[in-house]
Image (cartoon, rainbow, N blue to C red):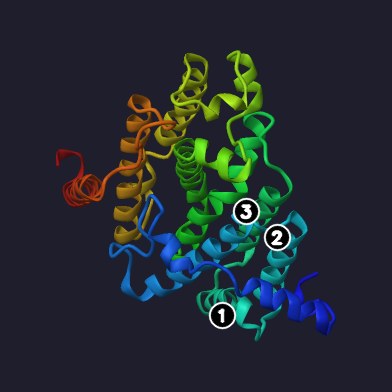
Amino acid sequence: MGATDRGNGTEMTAELQMSRQVDPAAQAREENFPVGSVLLPRGLRPHVATFYAFARTADDIADAPDLTAPAKLERLDALEAALINGSDLPACAVADRLRRSLLATGVTDTHARDLLAAFRRDARQDRCRDIEQLRDYCRLSASPVGRYLLDLHGEDRRGHALSDPLCDALQIINHLQDCKEDFQRMNRVYLPLDWLQDSGTDESSLLAGRSSPALRAVLDRCLDLCDTLLEKSRPLPHSLKSARLGAEAAVIHALARRMARRLRNRDPLCQRTRLSKPSALLVSVLAAGRFALTRAFGSRA
């Protein structure tokens, strides 16, 4: 399946090709949310960074515009082989580091493998037929991140029912922010095609200078779903045993709500929808402070 299962010639080709990957740390800085936040316990931050580096590397492979689908799948297979069996190939080092991290922390590799399944889907499929298909994609591409963090902190797995909707909302928000760029750069559309059709438009509307009323209706419909997911996940921070992880969840939830509101009032086709660093910092500090007060004094805070 992966590079460890192939003959020497193919193995060397895969190694040389995969070595062209973008630095995951540099890419991570472009994401909406901080990686390995200082809110998390110091001893766990390296493991979180290792997980995110793996996810970023796999995501870069799936998004690489100059690679064919078979080439992307070959590289993702090689990462999975290294994650399961280990590898001394430099190009698979990020997967081998995660394998060792998971062994050290006792966290299952299921979450990382689910991410790989999502990225394989990106390599094979560039449209979401309906909202069910988008939600299923989020189950593989977003939910595993929250599940990993909860498992790493030794939280009750019943908390996945609250972390899943938060992570899925974040994923959809990211899709909305990047809807035009994704279509232009990768010919990829995450907006449900049936919702576009119901609104009387199609994917070509993403290339316009600004959103048409029909496209705006689809964006708002997606944001309605995000609002529902965020409301469902609202109890997550105070349900967690770890105060530090709870504070992190509170900050991320607040950032997601702020970005969803921003997307309501701005057009992702022609306006900046991501928060500025000062705005994100202010939202984060306020959310962490509210969480700490409520944790200490209860509803009176």
How far is mark 3 from mark 1, CA to CA?
Answer: 31 Å
Mark closest to the chain's N terminus, 3 or 1: 3
Q: Which residue is mark 2?
A: 72
Q: Position of residue 241 (x, y in %)?
A: 36, 58
Q: Nearer the viewer, mark 3 or mark 1?
A: 3
Relative to 47, does residue 59 appear above or below in the rendering? Answer: above
Q: Residue at x 37, y 65 (%)?
A: 36
How far is mark 2 from mark 1, CA to CA?
Answer: 24 Å
Residue type beneath disc 3: Pro
Q: Position of residue 65 (x, y in %)?
A: 62, 53
Relative to 6, does residue 163 appear above or below in the rendering? Answer: above
Q: Position of residue 99 (x, y in %)?
A: 59, 76
Q: Which residue is mark 1?
A: 100
Left or right of residue 201: residue 31? left
Mark closest to the chain's N terminus, 2 or 1: 2
How far is mark 2 from mark 3, CA to CA?
Answer: 10 Å
Q: Which residue is mark 3?
A: 65
Residue type beneath disc 1: Arg
Q: Nearer the viewer, residue 90 or 156?
A: 90
Q: Which labelled disc corresponds to residue 39?
A: none
